Image (cartoon, rainbow, N blue to C red):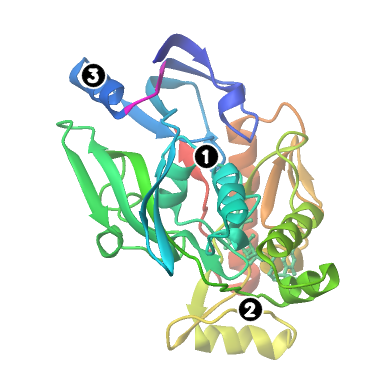
Amino acid sequence: MKITENSPLLRHNTFGMDVKAARMVEFDTEQELLEILTGPCDRVLTIGAGSNLLFLNDFCGTILHSCIKYIDVVSDEPDAVLVRVGSGVNWDSFVAWTVRNGFWGAENLSSIPGEVGASAVQNIGAYGAEAKDIIKEVRAVSIEDGSVRVFRNEECQYGYRQSIFKNELKGKYVVTAVTYCLSKKESPKLGYGALQERVKSLGAVTQSNIRLAVAQIRKEKLPDPAVLGNAGSFFMNPVISTELFERIRSEYPEIPSYVAPQGFVKIPAGWLIEKSGWKGQSLGPAAVHDRQALVLVNRGGATGADIKKLADTIIADVKRKFDVQLCAEVNYIE
Ligand code: EPU
């Protein structure tokens, strides 16, 4: 276990915010986490790789970071495996492991920054797949009383970028392990248009080619946080009424859309932001990425307030132009 006081967070957030935490605890086992939770703990924040948050200030409390790293096959059946993974495992290393072993289900989620624990909190999703599709259960420790609870998938209340850990139980549990159910049968998901074409151009429909295709598409659109600070999609794609969608479509027949529950349509926030004239634009050191308007970037030296100011300005402009309310996907940390 590593405990540091007045700990710099620059390497712990992909937006590149140069802030500090009063205390940072990196625990290697669930037992170590329990030891920390029985001691005095003021304000607590659990982070993964810091790839989906924006620090607005120094954090005056304790930051918990899981370094629990293992990948264990806990059940091996003819058609499927159950794999329990420590919450501190790098997400993409886990995906690479699944592909090496021929276990299907995670390959469309290749190259997503972050760690296994956060993937279950965020219900990460891309290219027609979501973490919830392969999660069997989530093991977590209560911050309040140190009790261990195993949440079955249905108990996690998963939705688009949503889970019980982001809502009702926000800040109340620390995820220590996630168990995934992966298929041993070939089960490619190529519904996302550009993915199918890209895989075809690489040859056969194999897990490796799907992984490579996803990595290539992401690289073309999304900035590398090591080069340009960012936290991936800054906003969620809004779900709007069919009526509002039709109103927008009468002016912009080309508007892309995703399926949503009856009476609603999900539309890409990136498209709305681009049509509002923000793609590639800056406000001080904060900017909108020039290849994917859904991503806000730190051009260097931006503070959390700079990024938030840009986000708020975009939200107001999109609201004015389209009457659509954008919501941040990134978590603001005060
Ligand atoms: N679009 C624009 N302008 C832009 C960006 C997008 O017109 O600047 C249009 C595209 O042309 C396309 C549509 O919007 O027709 C969708 O774009 P894209 O395929 O890039 O996907 P997205 O809806 O913008 C979502 C996820 C991404 C994920 C991709 C692929 C959210 C908030 N974002 O983006 O997730 O990689 O789909 O499945 O749901 C992330 O969460 O960090 C992330 C990158």
> Which segment did they paint magenta?
24-29
Q: Tell me if residue 27 is in the magenta stretch.
A: yes
Q: Is 254 in front, or is 82?
A: 82
- Left or right: 82, with 51 as reference point: left
The label shown at residue 35 is: 3
The label shown at residue 53 is: 1
- Residue 205 vertical position relative to residue 126 in the rendered view, above or below: below
Q: Where in the figure is residue 53, as x and y percent of width and height?
A: 52, 39
The residue shown at (46%, 34%) is 88
Please report whichever mark, 3 or 1, sits nearer to the chain's N-terminal start: 3
The quadrant of the picture showing ligand 1 is: bottom right
Q: Dot 2 surroundings within 10 Å: few (below 14), some, or many (20 or more)?
A: few
**Mark 2 and mark 1 residues within 8 Å of each other at the beta carbon:** no
Q: Dot 1 surroundings within 10 Å: few (below 14), some, or many (20 or more)?
A: many
Asked if one can make out residue 35 in the rendered structure from this viewpoint, the answer is yes
In three-dimensional space, the C-alpha distance between marks 3 and 1, rounded to whole angstroms, equals 26 Å
- Helix, strand, or loop for circle 1? strand
> Among all residues in the image, which is located at the extreme top?
5
In three-dimensional space, the C-alpha distance between marks 2 and 1, rounded to whole angstroms, equals 29 Å
Q: Where in the figure is residue 60, as x and y percent of width and height?
A: 39, 19
Q: Where in the figure is residue 51, as x and y percent of width and height?
A: 57, 40
Q: Which residue is mark 2?
A: 191
Please report whichever mark, 2 or 1, sits nearer to the chain's N-terminal start: 1
The image quadrant of residue 282 is top right
- Helix, strand, or loop for circle 2? loop
Callout 3 amino acid: Glu
The residue shown at (54%, 83%) is 244
